[in-house]
Image: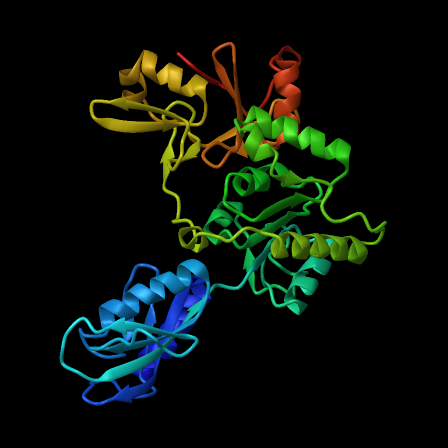
Amino acid sequence: MYDEFFSKAHELLSEGKPFATAIVVRAEKPTSAKPGDKAIVTPEGVMHGWIGGSCAQPTVIQEAMRALADGEPRLIRLSTDPQKETRAGLIDLPMTCFSGGTLEIYIEPQLPPTRLMVIGSLPVAQALARLGQAMNYHVVAVDPDTGGAGMAGADEVLTDLKKIKDKITALTYIVVASHGHYDELALESALRSKAAYVALVASKTRAVAVLEYLRRQGLTEAELARLKYPAGLDIQALRGDEIALSIMAEIVQRRRNAEPIELQALLPEPEPAEAIDLVCGMSVLTAGAEHRAEYHGQMFYFCCAGCQESFEQNPEQYLSQPVPSGEAIDPVCGMTVDIASAKYMSEYQGQLYYFCAPGCKLSFDKAPQKYVGIPAGGAPIQLV
């Protein structure tokens, strides 16, 4: 029984999920539970462990759920004859059956540790990871470039930007400090999440360009308004460690003045499902996808309105022909782009062009005629 209790607690803590502990502190016969018996209650109302049989379990689960909702521990007494006047700090509740006996049970919510997600691996990011660990945050480093080589202070390291969403809860504070390497991609996921704080380490000029790109990608003004830039409080910081300190100070300020968080918001987002856009071959997250079309009872997902419109005009064409795959050439910089994993694409005069970075896409969108005549090793895909 105790092995189950501690192993389950370790499992839930590792996954960053909230739960409540219930421990019997006093028992009067006849009861099946004894002092020291303990259980874990998950947000789904599932109990692991033992605090008594069917006379006690429903009430304990109910009170555990309330403790998770308000974040407050409680001491309850279960008996067949609840006292109208009880001692301070004790909640008297009736047993759900009449076998007799009395149980006093201490219930305590165990909320997941506050997460600090640091995206990037340059000096500011490294200093943030060290500060976060020293302040008992659960540090998640997102480092596609070096695989976390410079992020020794992190509890977890992600090397795939697609995995960011899986690690975000309402207790996650996100700082994007990739210095232009993948700011836009990271912020697309972060600003659409329920993170408590999203900040960008960048100049105001750079931040304005990032916001322009994100707006073109369909983020709402409310989502864009969540971005704090430049990150941190104005303490006249110059060095990387000083900037990190100003950011941590701002996170503490936000955290201590935040509104209470609903229980459901503390749970990690489920892993998103993906589908392939039949028109351009790009991978699309199905959850919350803006562009979709139903055909013969099946739902199809698209990366943009152009692909959706092309499909709707002639669905059979795209169902019968091979989905675009392989590589394409970025018409702006000449780099090779994998079509399936591409994040940036534009349609111009019936042809699809793929890009390696948001800067290339923005340059193309502003003056496509400047680039379409450049010969490249990979021809653009033509929309029929």
Q: Which quarter of the rendered picture does the C terminus lie within?
A: top left
Pick the residue in front: 204 or 59. 59
Q: Residue furthest bottom?
A: 29
Residue 42 visible? The answer is no
Q: Which quarter of the rendered picture does the N terminus lie within?
A: bottom left
Above or below 202: residue 358 = above
Residue at horizontal 42%, vertical 34%?
284
Q: Position of residue 79 (x, y in %)?
A: 24, 78
Left or right: 208 as drawn, with respect to 173:
right
Pick the residue in front: 361 or 54. 54
Q: Position of residue 97 (x, y in %)?
A: 15, 74
Residue 189 visible? The answer is yes
> Which color scheme does this rendered protein use?
rainbow
Q: Position of residue 309 (x, y in %)?
A: 39, 15
Q: Position of residue 167 (x, y in %)?
A: 49, 53
Residue at horizontal 35%, vertical 18%?
311
Q: Which image quadrant for residue 89?
A: bottom left
